[in-house]
Image: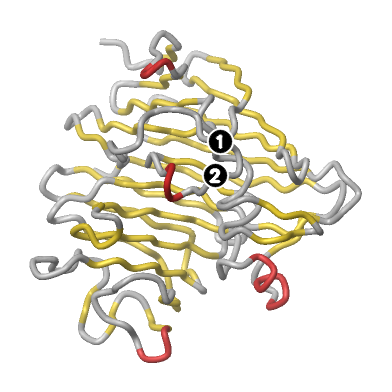
Amino acid sequence: MSTSPRLSTEWSPAGQQAVILANAETRVVVLPGLGGKIISVVDKRVDAELLWRNERIPLRPAAFGSGYDDQFLGGWDELYPNDEPEELAGEPVPDHGELWAVPWNWSTGSAVDQVWLELTVRGAVTGTEVTKRLTLGVGPELVADYRITNPGRVDQPFLWKSHVAVELRPDTMIDLAAGDVLMHEFGSPRVRPTGDSFTWPWVSGHDLRTLPDTTRRGVSEFLLATTLERGECGVRHPSTGTGLRLSWDRADLPSCWLFASYGGGWRGLDVLVLEPCTGFPLSVNDGVEAGTHQILPAGATKSWQLTAQLVR
């Protein structure tokens, strides 16, 4: 059997053009028309899907400016230049940014030992030029290279998050290379720390690397790492011998957020979202004022890389 990576464009689930990157170990499915979303990452060795898909929401385009939560398909997409709706650089930007609800342009390429998909889009509000290049070689790593350029005359305050919804299993372990973590006021967590901040992973005797007991109630938690020991987060599923690890240079993405709904704690769903991010808190304006969010100067370009690796 050939171990060379392959690329296919022959599948269109629910009428949406898919691009598939695959090798002997990994299969990745991307939907360029739905915000450039990665809808599936499969560990072929154990036939396990690693991304979470919200089966309540059909695979269909969302209207630009609509509420993100009501259109939350799952999978892996990108949020820029904001999370919560707010005015940035004098312009109102929609909920969870301007990238997730628009089609991306795309092209493909291949070499002997790798295949790639390059996706591009220009923000309707900010005018930011965005490029995402996904490369799969012969091993279990998907490399995502990102580039954003501000071609305008106005500096652009922003955050960038890779928003990766992952499957949960009863024995799932959560890995986060964090130091200090802020627990957001959202939801109904298993326990709240005094003062809302704690040192990962322990809060009042609860180990947040493990899933909570949800026999009596659902749990929902929103955590924002304010310091990282290194750029890394992920999940491991010991019962199936697989998992997904995200890694990056913490100088590029100095924070990581975790959004969790356990046992139906939020909207009756069971999902964890890994969110490597350029800063914190939710408000970009508040973060810029505090020095914890960034500004993309007029004419400037920022680039970075994130690697998604199957865990053995």
> In the visual, does 139 lie left or right of 102?
left
Amino acid at pointer 2: Ser
Seen at 72% across and 48% down, the residue is 302
- The N terminus, quarter of image: top left
Image spot of residue 300 (x, y percent): 82, 48
- Residue 305 figure quarter: top right
Question: Considering depth in this image, is 138 or 56 the residue closer to the camera?
Answer: 56
Residue 63 got which mark?
1
Q: Secondary structure at mark 2?
A: loop
**Quarter of the picture holding the C terminus:** top left
Which numbered marker is on residue 66? 2
Q: How far from the left and from the top, in percent, is residue 83? A: 56, 57
Residue 84 position (above or below residue 79)? below
Amino acid type, mark 1: Ala
Q: Nearer the viewer, residue 219 or 174?
A: 219
C-beta proximity under 8 Å, tags 2 and 1: yes
Label 1 environment density (alpha carbons within 10 Å; few <14, some 14–19, many ≥20): few
In the picture, measured across the screen, residue 166 lies left or right of residue 46, that is right
